[in-house]
Image (spheres, grey):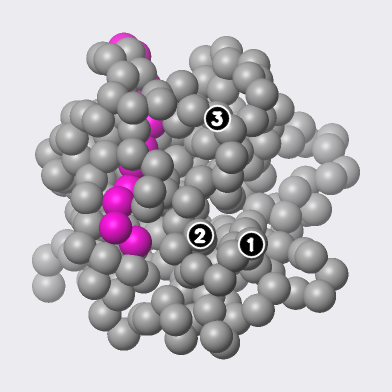
Amino acid sequence: MGTEITFSLVDEASFGSIPAPARRGARCQTCDYWERLDGSRDAPSAEATDAPAREDLKLGRLLAGRALAGAYGMLAWRTDGEDRIAVGWAQFGPLSAYPRALTIRERYPALPDVPAPWVITCLQVVAEADDRHAVAIGLLNAVGDELDRRGITAVEAYPEGVADDWSPSPGPSGVYAEAGFERAAGDDRYPVMRRELAGSAAGVEWGDLLAKARPVEDGGEGWPLPLPKGPSEDDLFRPPPPKPSKPNPFGDD
């Protein structure tokens, strides 16, 4: 039996298998770079006492959408015989889950606002993978299929054009282009890559989901999307209103 690449949504059992990203010193299991404008990709120091709490928080964020439609991350696995190793990782979710992505998107007012897209914030494949780009394309397609199943009609990513194109967490813009994404805004340095989806929602109907899933009483993280103020479910797909300008969301990479 030859090598096979498979894909699965992250869960409690696979969370620890998320492979190390290309950026030196970064660690996905504690990263809050996209969840906070002042967040960091850096792994906690060996002396840090808050590392377990940071891991618990990250896992909770990735699984926040599971009660509604599914987790916010997907792993690529290489299976060869009895060996199964995680070789790729993609993090995604609604704009409301990633303030840094929302702030980046605000720099491009020409982008369509309705329906608001979901975003892929992270795309990483280990350098040792036999065909790194092919695995990444397969991972993007798997994410696209999953979002299509959830009824999402568009997905965006904000890669960065740098010499080491795997170092930024979104991965290389060229991989997105090969996976059917088109540049919707930006330039070679900061492109916005966008892919339209069918939004077929096969087996998942938003009306049913909204009827069954309710926000937790204490306002915690169990409800991943903001409740609409009006009666229309379409409000769930509109981005939050514009906010005052903030520091450069791309950070000091």
Q: Residue flagged by tag 2: what amino acid is it?
A: Asp
Label located before the other in sequence (1 or 3): 3
Q: Which residue is mark 3?
A: 103
Q: Where is residue 130 drawn, in percent x and y?
A: 19, 44
3 or 2: mark nearer the eye: 2
Asked whether disc 2 touches disc 1, contact meaning CB atoms under 8 Å apart, the reply is yes
Label located before the other in sequence (2 or 1): 1
Which part of the image, by quadrant, shows the N terminus? bottom left
Q: Where is residue 242 drawn, in percent x and y?
A: 58, 33
Q: Which residue is mark 1?
A: 229
Q: Which residue is mark 2?
A: 235
**Residue 37: which quarter of the image?**
top right
**Closer-to-camera residue (251/59):** 251
Q: Secondary structure at mark 3?
A: helix
Q: Is residue 151 visible?
A: yes
Name the residue: 52% across, 20% down.
Answer: 250
**Residue 249: which quarter of the image?**
top right
Q: Residue flagged by tag 1: what amino acid is it?
A: Lys
Q: Residue flagged by tag 3: what amino acid is it?
A: Thr
Question: Is 5 on the left-hand or right-hand side of 122?
Answer: left
The magenta stretch is 152-163
Q: Where is residue 191 drawn, in percent x and y?
A: 30, 23
Between the C-alphas of marks 2 and 1, the distance is 8 Å
Q: Is residue 170 magenta?
A: no
